[in-house]
Image (cartoon, rainbow, N blue to C red):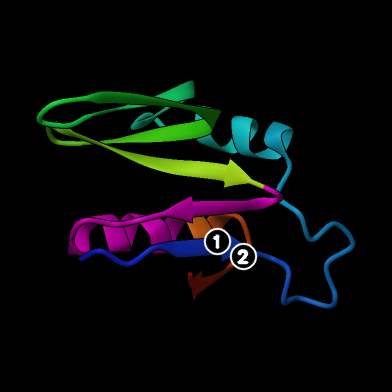
Amino acid sequence: MNQRFRITRSMQSDQPHPALSLEECRDYFASQSDFAYSDTLTVNGPESRMSIEGDFFMWQQGDKLIPFRLYAGDLYVAPPDEGAVNRMIAVATDLHADIVEG
Protein backbone atom coordinates (compact mmCIF):
# COMPACT_ATOMS: atom_id res chain seq x y z
CA MET A 1 0.00 0.00 0.00
CA ASN A 2 1.64 3.25 -1.14
CA GLN A 3 -1.14 5.59 -0.14
CA ARG A 4 -0.67 8.50 2.22
CA PHE A 5 -3.40 9.54 4.62
CA ARG A 6 -4.03 12.67 6.63
CA ILE A 7 -5.55 12.66 10.10
CA THR A 8 -7.29 16.03 10.36
CA ARG A 9 -10.01 18.02 12.05
CA SER A 10 -10.08 20.64 9.30
CA MET A 11 -13.43 19.41 7.97
CA GLN A 12 -15.17 19.73 11.33
CA SER A 13 -16.87 23.10 11.58
CA ASP A 14 -17.79 22.58 15.25
CA GLN A 15 -14.16 22.25 16.40
CA PRO A 16 -12.93 25.36 18.26
CA HIS A 17 -9.31 24.34 17.56
CA PRO A 18 -9.26 22.27 14.36
CA ALA A 19 -5.46 22.05 14.09
CA LEU A 20 -3.70 19.26 15.94
CA SER A 21 -1.05 20.92 18.09
CA LEU A 22 2.38 19.55 18.87
CA GLU A 23 1.58 19.67 22.59
CA GLU A 24 -1.67 17.74 22.11
CA CYS A 25 0.05 15.11 19.96
CA ARG A 26 2.97 14.77 22.39
CA ASP A 27 0.54 14.25 25.28
CA TYR A 28 -1.53 11.72 23.35
CA PHE A 29 1.35 9.68 21.93
CA ALA A 30 3.20 9.72 25.27
CA SER A 31 0.21 7.81 26.67
CA GLN A 32 0.64 5.14 23.97
CA SER A 33 3.29 2.56 24.86
CA ASP A 34 4.01 1.69 21.22
CA PHE A 35 4.88 5.25 20.08
CA ALA A 36 8.01 7.37 20.54
CA TYR A 37 8.70 10.96 19.50
CA SER A 38 11.55 11.85 17.14
CA ASP A 39 12.54 15.18 15.59
CA THR A 40 14.28 13.43 12.69
CA LEU A 41 13.26 10.65 10.34
CA THR A 42 16.14 8.80 8.72
CA VAL A 43 15.49 6.78 5.59
CA ASN A 44 18.13 4.35 4.39
CA GLY A 45 18.21 3.46 0.71
CA PRO A 46 20.44 1.01 -1.14
CA GLU A 47 23.00 3.69 -1.95
CA SER A 48 22.08 6.66 0.19
CA ARG A 49 20.74 7.88 3.49
CA MET A 50 18.37 10.81 3.96
CA SER A 51 17.32 12.61 7.15
CA ILE A 52 14.17 14.70 7.38
CA GLU A 53 13.63 17.10 10.26
CA GLY A 54 10.15 17.49 11.70
CA ASP A 55 7.82 16.16 14.38
CA PHE A 56 7.47 12.41 14.03
CA PHE A 57 5.62 9.99 16.26
CA MET A 58 7.14 6.62 15.46
CA TRP A 59 4.89 3.60 15.84
CA GLN A 60 6.67 0.34 16.59
CA GLN A 61 4.93 -2.46 14.69
CA GLY A 62 6.97 -5.62 15.17
CA ASP A 63 10.38 -4.87 13.67
CA LYS A 64 9.10 -1.89 11.64
CA LEU A 65 8.87 1.77 12.59
CA ILE A 66 6.00 3.64 10.95
CA PRO A 67 6.13 7.45 11.16
CA PHE A 68 3.09 9.59 11.90
CA ARG A 69 4.28 13.09 10.95
CA LEU A 70 2.74 16.22 12.38
CA TYR A 71 2.79 18.94 9.75
CA ALA A 72 0.70 22.13 9.57
CA GLY A 73 -1.83 20.90 12.14
CA ASP A 74 -2.43 17.47 10.62
CA LEU A 75 -0.87 14.03 11.04
CA TYR A 76 0.34 12.22 7.91
CA VAL A 77 0.95 8.49 7.65
CA ALA A 78 1.55 5.99 4.84
CA PRO A 79 0.38 2.69 6.31
CA PRO A 80 2.23 -0.27 4.78
CA ASP A 81 -0.37 -2.88 5.71
CA GLU A 82 -3.81 -3.51 7.21
CA GLY A 83 -2.48 -3.58 10.78
CA ALA A 84 -1.15 -0.07 10.35
CA VAL A 85 -4.46 1.06 8.85
CA ASN A 86 -6.25 -0.22 11.95
CA ARG A 87 -3.82 1.65 14.21
CA MET A 88 -4.24 4.82 12.13
CA ILE A 89 -8.03 4.57 12.54
CA ALA A 90 -7.63 4.13 16.30
CA VAL A 91 -5.41 7.23 16.51
CA ALA A 92 -7.88 9.32 14.49
CA THR A 93 -10.77 8.12 16.67
CA ASP A 94 -8.90 8.99 19.87
CA LEU A 95 -8.06 12.46 18.52
CA HIS A 96 -11.66 13.03 17.32
CA ALA A 97 -10.35 13.54 13.80
CA ASP A 98 -11.17 12.42 10.28
CA ILE A 99 -9.03 10.48 7.84
CA VAL A 100 -8.65 11.67 4.26
CA GLU A 101 -6.45 10.39 1.49
CA GLY A 102 -3.64 12.63 0.38
Q: Is residue 75 magenta?
A: yes
In the picture, measured across the screen, residue 5 lies left or right of residue 48, that is right
Looking at the rendered structure, the kind of residue marked 2 is Ala
Note whether residue 81 is visible.
yes
The secondary element bearing badge 1 is classed as strand
Residue under the image location 38 percent in, 29 percent down = 33
Residue under the image location 79 percent in, 61 percent down = 18
83 or 52: which is nearer to us? 52
Looking at the rendered structure, the kind of residue marked 1 is Ile
The secondary element bearing badge 2 is classed as loop
Residue under the image location 29 percent in, 57 percent down = 79
Q: What residue range appears in magenta?
A: 72-90
Q: Which mark sits nearer the N-terminus, 1 or 2?
A: 1
Q: Is residue 67 above or below residue 100?
A: above
Q: Quadrant of the rendered structure where residue 19 is?
A: bottom right
* Residue 58 x/y as whole percent: 38, 33
* Residue 23 x/y as whole percent: 72, 32
Note whether residue 31 is visible.
no
Q: Is residue 7 magenta?
A: no
Determine crowd level at label 1: few under 14, some 14-19, many 20+ residues with C-alpha closer than 10 A. Answer: many
In the picture, measured across the screen, residue 47 lies left or right of residue 36, that is left
In the picture, measured across the screen, residue 70 lies left or right of residue 90, that is right
* Residue 10 x/y as whole percent: 73, 69
Q: Quadrant of the rendered structure where residue 60 is?
A: top left
Q: CA gap, disc 1 to disc 2?
A: 6 Å
Q: Quadrant of the rendered structure where residue 7 is?
A: bottom right
Q: Which residue is mark 1?
A: 7
Mark 1 touches mark 2? (CB < 8 Å): yes
Q: Which residue is mark 2?
A: 97
Residue under the image location 13 percent in, 26 percent down = 47
